[in-house]
Image: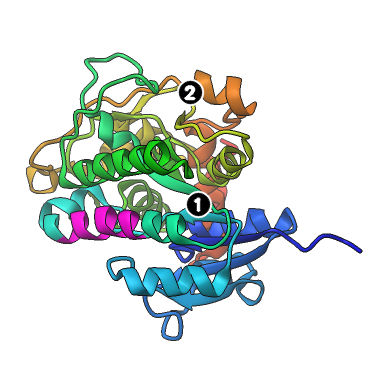
Amino acid sequence: MPEPARRALICGVSGQDGSYLAQWLLECGYEVWGTSRDAEGSAFGNLQKLGIRAQVRVLSMVPEDFRSVFVALRASRPDEVYYLAGQSSVGLSFELPAETLQSVVLGTLNMLEACRLADQPVRLYHAGSSECFGDTGGEPADEQTPFRPRSPYAVAKASAYWLVHNYREAYGLHACSGILFNHESPLRPARFVTQKIISTACRIASGSPERLQLGRIDIARDWGWAPEYVRAMHRMLQHPRPVDLVIATGQTHSLESFVETTFRLLGLNWHDHVDQTTALSRPNELLVSQADPGLAAQTLGWKAEYGMPEVVSMMLEAWKRASPIGSPGDARSAAN
């Protein structure tokens, strides 16, 4: 008699990472459950885009309400929980600091406590963030780098990281944090700067007279491909012991380089179409983010295959396929 499929609960399944993770786990033979604050009212657009909505069982769960979290865990009875829920925008966290801390910190605490009280062993993955490191003085951050958060979002993620660490030590919970650096895809919400750059540049290439408005473009980040990163999440929970790992490409590029690459692949000079404005600058901007993902390669055998140029190219191709306007700049294709 075949063994029953392993069961996973993805909290925040409607987001970029949650949707790609659901797709990957289904390919691995899992029974996949997902949560949303209002499962009945949510369209789960990303799951629809990936063609997997019908294969994911969904539950309503309010992360800040312990009873709601406990009921969702009891109903799904997962072997693995991927906690990806919570406010995920650094910029928005300056506008909604209290809401950001509550959704991230209290939500993580409630899930940890629910897993501790579960009547079966549960492995928990928590989505950490490279923002926790803050300014490392130009040195690549690894698992031993101290946290110096510089935004309400980063403070929330750092607090959640230490909660996971505490529950692991205090109760022997198989819980770990993936400290992910920036990872992008066509499923990124429009409020994220990478998606804003891609979509605006494509419309301009299609003939739109608009201009791309950006804040500082001298900031630098490690940009990877989100579908790769969810596989690292899965591998972390397959490891025999819980371990926190930095997940990144190990390559850092400026936002100006991201912009230049995008417009160049569309046959355009970015200088002709981009304006900078201080109105879009953050109160406490992190200038350079660098990573050392060596331990992930050593521990999991995971290494990013795609860097920033490939990410830009794949996002452009996805936009061209999905855009009702049509392919931007057919005569000025990414092959130029």
First of labels 1, 2 by sequence position: 2
Separation of disc 1 and disc 2 at Cα? 37 Å
Q: Quadrant of the C terminus?
A: top right
Main SS, magenta region, reads helix
Magenta extent: 99-110
Q: Residue at x 73, y 53 (%)?
A: 28
Q: Amino acid at mark 2?
A: Pro
Which labelled disc corresponds to residue 293?
Answer: 2
Taking 132 as reference, is 24 above or below it?
A: below
Q: Secondary structure at mark 2?
A: loop
Task: Name the image quarter holding residue 163.
Answer: top left
Residue tagged 1:
329
Judge from the rendering whether residue 72 lies leftward or rightward of residue 152; answer left or right: right
The local crowd at label 2, few if under 14, some if 14 to 19, many if 20 or more residues have their Cα within 10 Å, is many
Q: Does the magenta portion include 320?
A: no
Q: Residue at x 54, y 26 (%)?
A: 296
Q: Secondary structure at mark 1?
A: loop
In the image, residue 98 lies at what x, y percent? 12, 58
In the image, residue 264 lies at what x, y percent? 44, 35
Q: Residue at x 41, y 46 (%)?
A: 127
In the image, residue 76 lies at what x, y percent? 56, 71
Judge from the rendering whether residue 299 lies leftward or rightward of residue 168; answer left or right: right
Looking at this rendering, what residue extends furthest in the right direction? 1
